[in-house]
Amino acid sequence: MRTLALFLCAASLSACATTEDVVPVNYVPVAASQVSGASGVQVSVTTSDARTTNRGRISTKLNGYGMEMAAIRSQGEVTDIVRGALESELKARGYGLGAGGPTVNAAVETFYADFDVGMLAGKAKGDVKLTASVSAPGGAERYRTTVTGHAEKSVQLASGKNAAASLSEALADALRKLFGDQAFLQALR
């Protein structure tokens, strides 16, 4: 009986690493204050997928030995996650969303979480890289930059939930840097 219980326990634990995860990446907006003059500006947001690797997944599960196992995929499109995060940050600062004003475009170059296996705990490391630009209503580019975001947290499992949490924090880090750039805010006026 004991042997059977050990076998079933081992089988159930190993199956976790071989089963693909599909998880939501829930973005939590950064606390922000209203930008002076933002209420009169309508901004449209577009996103594009410029990733050259890992386009079909946001991470990969690891087994206890650090070997890659099953893919971790986002429940929604990565470009939709980034667009929603940008829109929520714009609204939090008082900008309206719609046509007629500047357009913010974000090309997603990296959106991936890696795991490190440790003795007692591992690490989930989320990395986000965006190339953001602002165009005037006529199409002339006013601003362009590349921002990166990074988040690292201790985890017990290389799971989809932990990958999504680290990516949400990394996206917040990247957007904090973007909205902290006065040249970006100036380009929105």
Image (cartoon, rainbow, N blue to C red):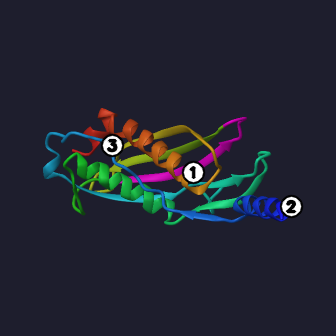
The residue carrying mark 3 is 30
Q: Quadrant of the C terminus?
A: top left
Side of 5 relative to 81 (left or right): right
Query: Which percent across, then down, holds residue 91?
Result: 24, 52
Q: Which residues are magenta?
A: 103-120
Query: Which percent across, then down, holds residue 141?
Result: 36, 48
Q: Quadrant of residue 87?
A: bottom left
Query: Which percent across, then down, holds residue 34?
Result: 18, 42
Q: Secondary structure at mark 1?
A: helix
Residue in view at x 64 percent, y 49 percent: 157
Q: CA distance from mark 2 to mark 3?
A: 51 Å
Closer mark to the observer between disc 2 and disc 3 = 2
The total of numbered circles placed on residues is 3
Query: Which percent across, then down, holds residue 186?
Result: 25, 38
Amino acid on which disc 2 is placed: Thr
Q: Which mark is residue 3?
A: 2
Q: CA distance from mark 1 to mark 3?
A: 19 Å
**Label 3: how many Cα within 10 Å (few below 14, some 14–19, many 20+):** some
Closer mark to the observer between disc 2 and disc 1 = 2
